[in-house]
Structures are given as C-alpha cells and as structure tokens.
C-alpha cells in the first residue's frame, strides 16, 4: 500500500489542477485533502489550495460529527474568504484580494510563511473557480487544488480541473453492494470517452440549446427545445449522426431518443459528466439499443478513496470494500486513514 500511495501522489504531479470531491458528506474528502497536502513535494512544485464551501471546521455543521482541520505547510498558497483569513492560525503574506465575493466576504489569496491551520472558503461558482485558477497561473503555481463540497460535482467539472480524486464510503450507502454499484456508475460517467476532434471544434462554442450533426458533418439547431422540454420532435433527422445536449441530460429525454428509430445508433454528446442526470437503467437501455454517450471535456480520475465508517457509526470491512470496488472500477482504491 505504501508503494501504491507514492504512485497516487506522483500521479497528481502530472497535472496542473486537481479537484477532490465527495459523493456524500463524511466520505473522507477532507482527510484526502490533508493526506495530499502533507505529502506533496513543495521543493518541486508551487502549490495552491482553495475550497468550495467551508473546510477546516472542527465540527460538521450538518451532522455534528468531528471534522479534521486543514494544516498548510510553509510556502503553500491558499484562497479563502476575508472572514476566515482573519481567523487564520499561521503567518502569511497577502497576495491578492479579488472582486470575487462570497457570503463571508471577498476571496483572499495568500502564501503561508509558517505552518498552521486555516479555514478554507473560496469561490463558490465555476466561473469564480476558473478566475482563481487563472490568477494562480499568473503567480506561477504548478498545482492548484480545489476541495469540493456536498453534491457539488458540477464544480469538479473538467472546465475547472485537469484531474480528480473521488471520495466515497459508508455515508453514501451502508450496503456494500449498493455502495460499489453507485460509485462505479459515477466512475463510468467520469471516464466517458471524448467525442471526435471535429465534434469538439464544432460543438464547444455552443453553450445552450440542442444541436445535431448530419452524416455530411453539417451542424443544425433544434430551435426552442431543451432536453427538459415536454415535447421534443426529431423531424427531419433521418441522417443524424451526432446529437448534442448543451444543458442537462435527463432520463425522460434519453428515453425519447432511445425510442426514436432514426436515432438508433446516434452518438449523444454532452459537455462533461456533470451534465448527466440519468439512472443506470436508462443508460444501459440506451447503450443496448446501439447508442453511445461522449463528452467534450473530461478530467483524469486519479484514484478513489473510501471512508468505511458512516456518521451513525456503522463500519464496513475496509479491506473487502477497497478490493471489490477496485475490481469494479479498475482503479486504485484507498482507505487513507487505515493505510
């Protein structure tokens, strides 16, 4: 496990940005962040970290359970709100105060001059995170880390970070089989293949609506329609090869596509995995029909971590969980507290 853990950290160093996201509260996301921050080689890389929501509290405000505190090492950069910057327990150099505002004030970026504890509460929107990431590049940061928040997978979008670590565990489900199935499905979505280069060039600028590409490579708009529309007509699309949904992909729309004989082997494209809100059953039926789902952007999923203990105190067998989940997703799975 020690060798695997070293590889885990080494893999992170291949990317300039990392999101750490949890599938549920108390799945060990903050422990994963602590683990990563303690082991990154700061003599090789300049590292910055921020958080969606609030991280570093000693007590979870929802479940009232104990939370691990965030400790920054000397030389690390960090982004947090004005309110939490004033509460820092370290000496720091102020780098920037942005126009990005949160409920706790503007986002402050600073560099730790000593080791110490901090509450992280950075940008809370995708655009805000993108701006912060851009600012970090101006400060020659090699690796920017974003710590996610409850049900905010959209902020783990590939539009924000190149790589990703997923935290799951008994808080997501105390039924091991169900936990593995549900986690594996999310991993499948994260790992969806990119569409063709020509599709990426054609579709990336389209941020809203629904579009389709015919067999000759010509782009067509479906006016006044979204995937959430009650009535969706696919008239005149007999030669459709690619169907693009700029917004959310939901069960009802996927079922309409599946039942249309002209779209039997269509490639359905979404911007990234965070736009997909379909059940495993609908997705499997669509694929069985001959359809495929592809994405315009994707992040590299580096690893999955598990917390085998639920907030109620129920404990799953960590070794069995790691082994079975790793087999199901073909990726390393770590219980960082145990190992």
Image (cartoon, grey):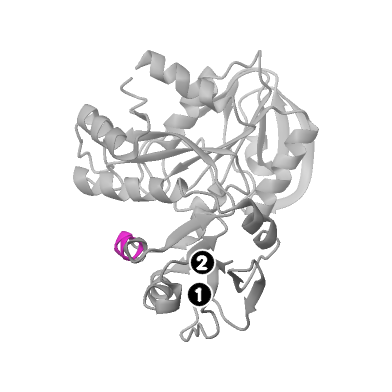
Q: Is residue 93 left or right of residue 220?
A: right
Give the residue drawn at x 63%, y 44%. 122
* Residue in the foreground of this view, choosing between 95 and 271: 271
Magenta segment boundaries in residue numbering? 280-285
Q: Mark 2 or 1 closer to N-term? A: 1
* Residue in the foreground of this view, choosing between 209 and 56: 209
- Above or below residue 73? Residue 283 is below
Rendering coords of residue 220 (x, y %): 65, 75
Quadrant of residue 253 within the rendered picture: bottom left
Give the residue drawn at x 54%, y 61%. 270
Rendering coords of residue 282 (x, y %): 33, 66
Q: Is residue 51 left or right of residue 81?
A: left
- Reply yes or no: does residue 152 show up in magenta: no
- Above or below residue 196? Residue 202 is below
Q: Which mark is residue 227?
A: 1
Q: Is residue 327 left or right of residue 238?
A: left
Figure quadrant of the C terminus: top left
Q: Can you identify the residue that label 2 sits on?
A: 248
Quadrant of residue 64 within the rendered picture: top left
């Amino acid at each position: 496990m020690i060798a695997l853990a070293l590889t885990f950290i080494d893999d992170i160093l291949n990317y300039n940005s990392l999101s750490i996201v949890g599938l549920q509260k108390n799945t060990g996301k903050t422990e994963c962040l602590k683990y990563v921050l303690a082991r990154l080689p700061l003599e090789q890389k300049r590292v910055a970290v921020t958080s969606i929501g609030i991280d570093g509290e000693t007590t979870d405000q929802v479940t009232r359970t104990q939370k691990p505190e965030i400790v920054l090492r000397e030389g690390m950069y960090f982004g947090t709100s004005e309110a939490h910057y004033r509460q820092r327990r370290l000496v720091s150099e102020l780098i920037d105060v942005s126009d990005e505002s949160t409920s706790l004030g503007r986002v402050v970026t600073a560099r730790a001059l000593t080791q110490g504890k901090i509450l992280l509460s950075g940008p809370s929107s995708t655009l805000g995170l993108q701006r912060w990431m851009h600012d970090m590049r101006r400060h020659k940061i090699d690796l920017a880390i974003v710590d996610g928040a409850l049900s905010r997978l959209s902020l783990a979008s590939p539009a924000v970070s190149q790589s990703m670590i997923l935290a799951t565990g008994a808080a997501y489900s105390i039924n091991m089989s169900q936990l593995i199935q549900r986690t594996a499905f999310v991993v499948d979505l994260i790992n969806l293949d990119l569409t063709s280069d020509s599709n990426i060039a054609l579709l990336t600028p389209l941020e809203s609506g629904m579009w389709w590409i015919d067999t000759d490579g010509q782009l067509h708009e479906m006016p006044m329609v979204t995937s959430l529309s009650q009535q969706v007509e696919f008239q005149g699309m007999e030669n459709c090869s690619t169907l693009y949904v700029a917004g959310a992909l939901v069960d009802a729309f996927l079922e309409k596509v599946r039942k249309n004989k002209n779209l039997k082997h269509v490639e359905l494209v979404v911007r990234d995995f965070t736009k997909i809100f379909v059940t495993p059953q609908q997705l499997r039926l669509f694929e069985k029909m001959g359809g495929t789902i592809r994405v315009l952007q994707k992040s590299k999923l580096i690893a999955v971590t598990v917390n085998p203990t639920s907030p109620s105190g129920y404990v799953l067998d960590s070794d069995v969980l790691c082994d079975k989940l790793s087999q199901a997703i073909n990726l390393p799975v770590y219980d960082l507290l145990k190992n």
